[in-house]
């Protein structure tokens, strides 16, 4: 998903910066408000950021100018909401661009939009819908993080197809043709990676429920009654 430095032409890299910056600014506001109200949440924010960094650094070659990898942003979206997840994703992507040659500065806006904004938003909406429907919590986490991952790559596919619709890269014949080509290549790597990320995320939440469920209740991720049910504790 990390589109490499200098790959997106004008005006597309500027467009994605313009779209992403307002969301990041709002996310910074939300994060500052959360930290001021709950200083004890800082370690959890750091862990969520580290989780994003580790998973998104496990890259596999995929589409020309990009790559495939888990994102890790779904867990942050479930815990903190999509706006704060966007800030964590931006920090990780900036660090990777500067020190790991993973992604780039000019492509940062596009990478933030796909991995830091749309992916977490989809994960958050799927999680809320699943919990409202009273599905199993771990199944909901699996679905939310997997769909968030797939949404990230769908947006990356759109970004690449918009930038290269007329065959400069893969002999495409317009936006729709380019979308199909980029999307079909991503599908080979990203379908199994998203399933893997969903399973890892569900296992991680199972651990948190067992050892630190009070955090989930305090963050309003889960109601206390749901935690008790998950842990097999009678009311």
Image (cartoon, grey):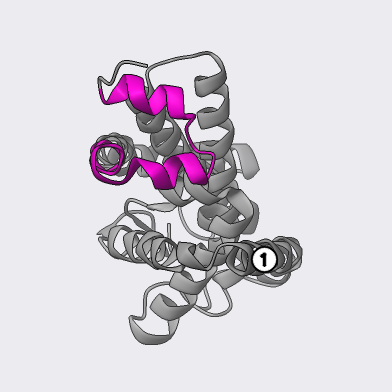
Residue 203 in picture, x, y percent from top left: 23, 38
Residue at 44% x, 71% y is: 92
Q: Which residue occupies the foreground of this view, 124 or 151?
A: 124
Viewer can see residue 157:
no
58 shown above or below 177 = below
Locate the C terminus and report the quarter of the image it occupies: top left
Residue 124 in picture, x, y percent from top left: 55, 38
Residue highlighted by disc 1:
24
Q: Which residue occupies the foreground of this view, 87 or 60?
A: 87
Residue 230 colored magenta?
Answer: yes
Residue 227 colored magenta?
Answer: yes
Determine whether, in the image, residue 197 is placed left or right of residue 214.
left
63 shown above or below 212 = below
Viewer can see residue 87:
yes
- Specify the farthest residue to the front: 235
Bounds of the magenta span? 203-231
Locate the N terminus and report the quarter of the image it occupies: bottom left
Residue at 44% x, 22% y is: 225
């Amino acid at each position: 998903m990390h589109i490499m430095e200098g790959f997106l032409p004008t005006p597309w890299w500027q467009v994605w910066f313009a779209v992403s910056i307002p969301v990041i600014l709002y996310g910074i506001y939300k994060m500052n408000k959360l930290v001021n109200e709950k200083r004890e949440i800082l370690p959890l924010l750091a862990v969520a950021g580290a989780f994003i960094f580790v998973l998104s650094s496990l890259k596999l070659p995929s589409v020309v100018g990009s790559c495939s990898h888990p994102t890790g942003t779904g867990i942050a979206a479930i815990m903190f909401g999509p706006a704060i997840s966007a800030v964590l994703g931006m920090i990780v992507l900036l660090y990777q661009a500067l020190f790991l040659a993973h992604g780039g500065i000019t492509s940062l806006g596009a990478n933030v939009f796909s991995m830091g904004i749309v992916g977490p938003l989809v994960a958050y909406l799927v999680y809320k819908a699943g919990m409202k429907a009273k599905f199993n919590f771990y199944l909901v986490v699996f679905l939310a993080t997997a769909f968030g991952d797939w949404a990230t790559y769908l947006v990356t596919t759109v970004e690449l197809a918009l930038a290269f619709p007329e065959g400069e890269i893969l002999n495409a014949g317009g936006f729709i043709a380019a979308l199909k080509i980029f999307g079909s290549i991503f599908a080979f790597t990203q379908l199994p990676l998203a399933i893997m990320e969903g399973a890892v995320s569900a296992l991680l939440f199972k651990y948190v429920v067992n050892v630190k469920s009070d955090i989930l209740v305090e963050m309003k991720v889960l109601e206390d009654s749901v935690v008790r049910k998950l842990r097999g504790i009678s009311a």
